[in-house]
Amino acid sequence: MIGIVVPAHNEEACIRSCLTALREAARHADLAGEPVEIVVVLDACTDATGVFACAAGAMTLSVRARNVGMARAIGAEALLARGARWLAFTDADTVVACSWLADQLSLGADAVCGTVGVVDWTPHGAHAPLLEWHFQQTYTDTEGHSHVHGANLGVSAVAYRRAGGFRHLQCSEDVALVNALVASGAAVVWSAKPRVVTSARKDGRATGGFADALINAVAQRLEAAARPLLLPTPASSSINHP
């Protein structure tokens, strides 16, 4: 069995799109009918996320931690207890490709770190073109990249257990897991083959996560654009301004 973990905090606006895509990925022909179970970990949800998740056929677990590392860990343990051989992780504001699971498994690795794409930058308003340009210039969406995203991550049950699983971190729990996997000797592949599209929203659920990284990128670009160009002034001359 393949297990998918989706942590969620008040995600009623996007959880249905996420789960629709996951169900399609679970039916991919290359999986040869292997069962796929989805668990949505409702972390301090006060909206209808759980209602929509149940209606979509996902298993739900409730916690009140506001801790994405703990949410991922709890979901993983639940699926391992049900016999999952492979754990795939994504986020509630993310839509996976129909071949997402099949592509992770096709790489024959102990763990797969995928990339993310963004198609809608409009949440950033007037700064949207700047941020899209910055992303295109600085993000590596190729084989052998160095990114780690909880929105596009897969790991075998054996490797996950050997690495100690997710730590209960409020941010960078995905990086900590991958570092532990590498330290444990797991075969980790950084690939652009498994595809997901994620949100460029400004109101991220985890401090220091992808949303904060985008906002920081905007701030850095604006600061750089506003910084005056400083030219050296020869000691024997002066610059006259009109």
Image: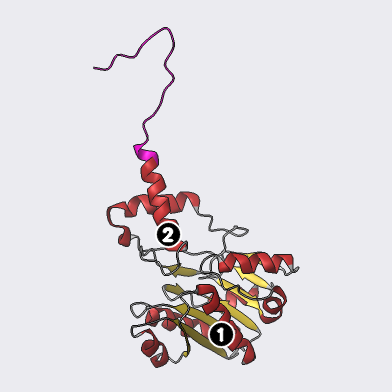
| Up-down relation of residue 63 to residue 222 (above or below) | below
- How are the colours assigned in the image? secondary structure
Residue tagged 1? 29
The label shown at residue 212 is 2
Q: Is 73 or 40 nearer to us in this picture?
A: 73
Seen from this angle, which residue lies furthest top? 236
Residue 234 image position (x, y, % from top left): 43, 12
Quick check: can you spot residue 171?
yes
Q: Amino acid at mark 1?
A: Ala
In which image quadrant can residue 120 be found?
A: bottom left
Up the image or down, 35 lies above or below 149; here it is below
Q: Residue at x 49, y 74 (%)?
A: 67
In this rendering, the answer to whether 3 lies above or below 206 is: below
CA distance for labels 2 and 1: 37 Å
Q: Quadrant of the C terminus?
A: top left
Q: Which residues are magenta?
A: 224-242
**Residue 4 marker:** none
Left or right of 83 on screen, residue 233: left
Rendering coords of residue 175 (x, y %): 59, 64
Q: Residue at x 36, y 65 (%)?
A: 201
- Local crowd size for mark 2, using a 10 Å CA cut-off: few (<14), some (14–19), many (≥20): some
Residue 106 in the magenta stretch? The answer is: no
Q: Of circles 2 and 1, which is in front?
A: 2
**Residue at point 69% right, 69% down?**
181
Magenta: main secondary structure: loop
